Each structure stands twice: as structure tokens, then as C-alpha cells.
Amino acid sequence: MMTTVKPLGTTILERVGNTPLVRLEGLTAHLPGIQILGKAEWANPGGSVKDRAASAIVTDALKRGLIGSARGSDVAKGLLDATSGNTGIAYAMFGAALGFPVTLCMPSNVSPERKKYLAAYGAEIVWTDPADGSDGAIRKARELAAAEPGRYFYADQYSNDENWRAHYCTTANEIWQQTEGQITHFVAGLGTSGTFMGTTRRLRELNPKIRCISMQPDSAFHGLEGLKHMATAIVPRIYDPALADANIDMDTEVAYKMARTLGRKHGLLVGISSGAAVAASLQVAEQEAAAGREAVIVTILPDSAEKYMSDRFWLEKD
């Protein structure tokens, strides 16, 4: 008699999301009635917030037959995209797990740790001029997609609505549940803008009074990997500047200093964009405290410090 064995465990796609919310209470000890909470996105299987968008884009593409598995066939239509690192790592992880080839265009000056992750997952990398930043990678991906449309599904995370929908469906609802609806402010950095767009849209539906503040680098020449200075960059199609109640321009050195502070004084090793997000949240916290208001401020910590440990700024003294 045949018996059916029930599948145990979870798939790699099912492991994305439901990340913890971390209290950064040491930062607001001098601000009565103010809380800053960080969404620890390094708990995703690929180690970053970009797992959310990548999983949604991949799932949608598989359902529509836009990418094909190499398993059981001689030819597989691969996924192509431009990335500054974390989305590429997520794509490469899913491609390795699900059996489709991944080609990524990215600046050659990304951290050595990112390069090692991508090599470990077996992705094909097309390196672009670091002076051109993420925009150079976008232009190269468009060129490849136009030259060989039959070879690639061009995921185009900067224009793909599945990017922001991933956060509308997951990130925002998790934040709402984890704060028991007490969130008053949401702060997030702008790269593709998907995290901010999707989370803000859903939070506004849950409570229109929540203030949503975006953060971006303060100049075109910055060290905030993964973030875009919208005034000088190729603006993502999914970005809507009207959604933000306010925007904070972040200085690179301020972000570096916050990342060091979180490690040295709070035992929390986070990436550069996470340092920037916390620094922006602290600005909001101080404004609210000065006005005599209480606040529950939630921000996104896109990744941990593990992909940045070769950077020299960790060695600097404050």
C-alpha cells in the first residue's frame, strides 16, 4: 500500500518575510515617549530586504512563463537585471534554488563580499564602470535585453510593480501587526523606491495619520550603496515623490558614523543604508520630542554589516 509523505520544512521562497522588529531603545533614552524600531531584514534567507521584491518578481515571472527552468529541458530563458548588489544576490539565490540562469549588470566597485556571494550562487556578472554607478548598470541591462530579447526576461526591478507590491502585501502588514497598530512614523531609504512606495501605500490605508518620510543621499557623489540621489539619477518608474510627507537628505559620513555607533554602543552591526535609515529616524525622533509629541517610529534595516566588513570606515574613531 502506497502512502503519501507530507512535505516537511519550507521552501526558500516561503522563508522570505516575517522578520523581527528590533527596539533601538538606547538611541532614544534621552527622548521620553519616543521609540525607534528597526525591521531586521537581514533575517531573510538572502540576507536583505531585497529578498522580498526579488521573490515577488520571480514568482510572478514563473507563473507567466517568462523565465524557464533548466531542469528537464536543454534551454532555459534566464533572468536579467541591473543591481547594486542585494537584489542580485536574491535573484542568484532563487535562480540556484529553482533552476534558472541569472545574469546581472552591476558596478565593478561593489564590495568584495557581494562579489563572493554572487560567485557562490553561480550568477553570471557583467561588470560596469563604477563611475556610472547604478545608472550605468541599468543602461547595460537595457542594452543586453534589447540585443537578445529571446534569451532574457528583463526583470527591471526599477519599473516592475511586483517590487512595491511585495512590500504592500508583506512589509507594511508585518509592521502594523508587530506594533499593534501603534506606529506613528515610517522612515525608509530610496533606491528602487519599492520598499517605501509599497509600505507607505498600505500603511496609509491602515491609518492615514501615519507620517511617511523618505530618505536619500544628499548628493550625486555619495557612499550610500544601494540608495539613489533622485535629482541626478535615472528615476525609477515605480517612484512617486508625492507619497512622502517629507524627505531627508542624508550625508554619507553621518550614515557611516551611525553604523559605527550602532555596532560599538548598541551591539548591532548593520549595513551602511541601515545606518542612514537610523540616522534619519533619529532626526524625526528629535523633532517630535522637541514638539512635545510621543512617537513610534519604524524604519527598515535593509541588511547587516557582513557585506561591508572590508570597508575602512569601521576603523575610524568618532
Image: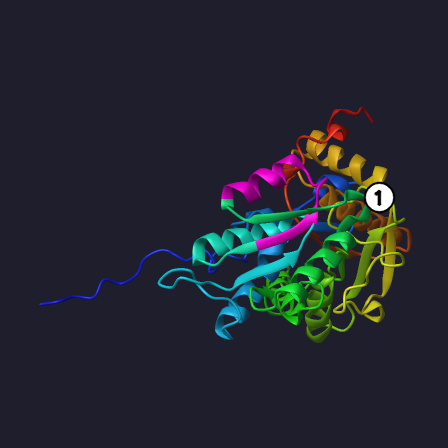
Q: Residue 240 falls in which quadrant of the image?
A: bottom right
Q: Quadrant of the image for the C terminus?
A: top right
Q: Is residue 164 left or right of 189 when viewed as pictured?
A: left
Magenta-highlighted residues: 103-120
Label 1 secondary element: loop
Magenta stretch: residue 112 in it?
Answer: yes
Category of crowding for the residue at label 1, using alpha-carbon neighbours closer than 10 angstroms: few (below 14), some (14–19), many (at least 20): some
Q: Quadrant of the image for the N terminus?
A: bottom left
Visible residue check, residue 178 = no
Residue 62 lies, in percent from the top left, at: 49, 69
Residue 292 lies, in percent from the top left, at: 88, 55
Magenta stretch: residue 14 in it?
Answer: no
Q: Is residue 53 left or right of 238 when viewed as pictured?
A: left
Residue 128 lies, in percent from the top left, at: 72, 47
Q: Is residue 129 left or right of 102 when viewed as pictured?
A: right
* Residue located beneath label 1 in the image: 222
The residue lying at 54 percent from left, 41 percent from top is: 119
Residue 308 lies, in percent from the top left, at: 67, 36
**Amino acid marked by disc 1:** His
Observer-nearest residue: 279 or 140? 140
The residue lying at 75 percent from left, 28 percent from top is: 312
